[in-house]
Amino acid sequence: MTKIVRVGVTFPPDLLRDFDETIGKIGYENRSKAVQDAVRMFVSEKKWLQEEKGTQAGVLMMLYDHEVRGLEDALTDVQHHHANIICSTMHIHLSERDCLEAIAVKGDAAEIRRLSDELTAKRGVKILKTMLISM
Ligand code: NI
């Protein structure tokens, strides 16, 4: 018998609306299955990144809300801290609130992972995708 655990999670209303719309189009019959699938995808992507080793090059693509207080300063601090692996950063003002940053990186996989983790964990960062190639 499979045990099921119930958890309570809070969502910003617009994120939940987007999620419900998206899973509705795909044809999910309930939200739980869709959340489980999304979490599974997140875990597999993060696990893959944990296992990368050696010198890597690539791009971090980060979407964030620049109106979240203190966020831009915090993101800049993190990037200065890892300046040795950052080759270039491109900033795109997407909408009134959303900014997209493409951060080109080259260096040790463990440090790229630390940079990625430190940025992802900040409140106001909505999406962070890491695309890497081995060198
Ligand atoms: Ni911007």
Image (cartoon, rainbow, N blue to C red):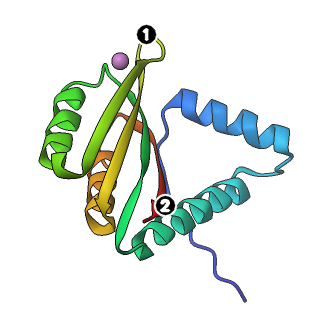
Marks 1 and 2 sit apart, C-alpha to C-alpha, by: 33 Å
Secondary structure found at label 2: strand
Q: Where's residue 126, x and y in %?
A: 44, 37
Residue name at image x 69 percent, y 84 percent: 2
Tell which of 5 and 89 is nearer to you: 89
Q: State the residue lying farthest toward the front.
A: 135
Residue name at image x 63 percent, y 75 percent: 4
Q: Where's residue 98, x and y in %?
A: 43, 21
Indicate the quadrant containing the N terminus: top left, top right, bottom left or bottom right: bottom right
In the displayed structure, 134 sits above or below 16; it is below
Mark 1, ligand 1, within 8 Å: the answer is: no
Hey, which quadrant is residue 34 in on the image? bottom right
Secondary structure found at label 1: loop
- Within-10-Å neighbours for mark 1: few <14, some 14–19, many 20+: few
Give ligand 1's quarter of the image: top left
- For residue 96, the mark is 1
Of callouts 1 and 2, the N-terminal one: 1
Whether residues under marks 1 and 2 lie with C-beta atoms below 8 angstroms apart, the answer is no
Tell which of 124 and 98 is nearer to you: 98
Give the residue number, with chain letter if any, for mark 2.
Answer: 133
**Label tally:** 2
Kind of residue indicated by mark 2: Ile
